[in-house]
Image (tube, helix red, strand yellow):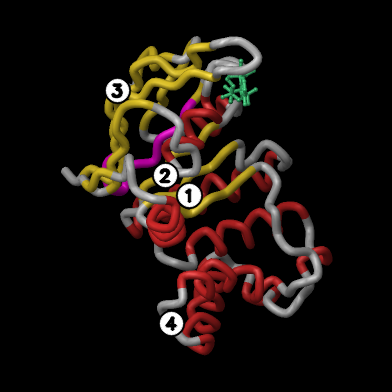
Amino acid sequence: MEKILEARHIDKYFKKPNKFHVLKDINFFIEKGEFASIMGKSGCGKSTLLYILSTMDTDYSGELLIQNDLVTGRNSNELARIRNKHIGFVFQFHYLLPEFSVLENVMIPAKKLGEYSSEQIRENALKKLRNLGIEKLADKKAFNISGGEKQRVAIARALINDPLIIMGDEPTGNLDSYNSDKVFNEFRKLSSEQGLSLLVVTHDEDFAKNTDRIITMEDGKILNSN
Ligand SMILES: Nc1ncnc2c1ncn2[C@@H]1O[C@H](COP(=O)(O)OP(=O)(O)OP(=O)(O)O)[C@@H](O)[C@H]1O
């Protein structure tokens, strides 16, 4: 068993407008290849937790480990690099750059990482698009494709640096059931065929019940993580 992501005793308070204990002793881990979802009522702390797990929020107590390495306490440059290399993000809104082509959008995180030549990045981006069945969109401008296609492009972009884990915040929240199923099936394939781990915050019960594990949150705590 290989732990990809681990939260140990994570606690967080918001200080303004009033002191508010938003996350209370969060403990769990995600294994390699595991496809997990996080569910819970609005306001229970799901997005706040995901923000910490993704290394974007450092204002918490407790420990965050990625592949058994302690990430808590690293400086912001190191965190940006860890994030770009190891974590892929898929949000409810795709945040593609509309005037850039699909291919250029997918290439952006790899250019930022700076480990490969433009030609290698281009080849890799085309491969990711091909695996998602959307290679034909490569030269289209991002504003010129459908909502479901945009979300698949966002998945290709999340995969470009071959991350350890994909984190999703309501990745199907803006999609109809046909496109939600497509996104779910892509995630499932990535976990079972490529051993990628996925952690997805969702309100969609159909989506969650088909993941390997539902982590249920209530009032800043994890109730169960079966
Ligand atoms: N920056 C902030 N300052 C103070 N309180 C905040 C801040 N961000 C969120 N909160 C509060 O913290 C609680 C948890 O918010 P969070 O966004 O994590 O919930 P959530 O479970 O993701 O909700 P939703 O399902 O609606 O997205 C909420 O009560 C929210 O109002």
Task: Please rate how many residues cluster around mark 4, counting C-alpha atoms within 10 Å: few if below 14, some from 14 to 19, many from 20.
Answer: few
Taking the image as shown, residue 51 lies to the left or right of residue 170, namely left
- Dot placed on the residue nearer the N-terminal end, 4 or 3: 3
Gap in angstroms between the C-alphas marked 4 and 2: 25 Å
Q: Is mark 3 within 8 Å of ligand 1?
A: no
Circle number at residue 198? 2
Q: Is residue 71 left or right of residue 198?
A: left
Q: Which residue is mark 1?
A: 187
**Magenta span contains residue 42:** no
Q: Position of residue 217 (x, y in %)?
A: 46, 17
Q: Which residue is mark 4?
A: 116
Main structural element of the magenta stretch: helix, strand or loop?
A: strand
SS at badge 4 = loop
The question of residue 37 being in magenta is answered with yes
Determine if the C-beta at disc 4 is less than 8 A from ligand 1: no
> x and y percent of residue 127 in the render?
50, 76
Q: Amino acid at mark 1?
A: Phe
Of marks 1 and 4, the one in the foreground? 4
Q: Residues within 10 Å of mark 2 (few under 14, many from 20)?
A: many
Check if mark 1's residue and mark 2's residue have beta carbons within 8 Å.
Answer: yes
For marks 1 and 4, give the CA distance.
26 Å
Instruction: Describe the element under mark 3 as helix, strand or loop.
Output: strand
Q: Amino acid at mark 3?
A: His
The answer to which of marks 1 and 3 sits earlier in the sequence is 3
The structure residue drawn at horizontal position 48% and vertical position 54%, both measured from the top left corner, is: 88
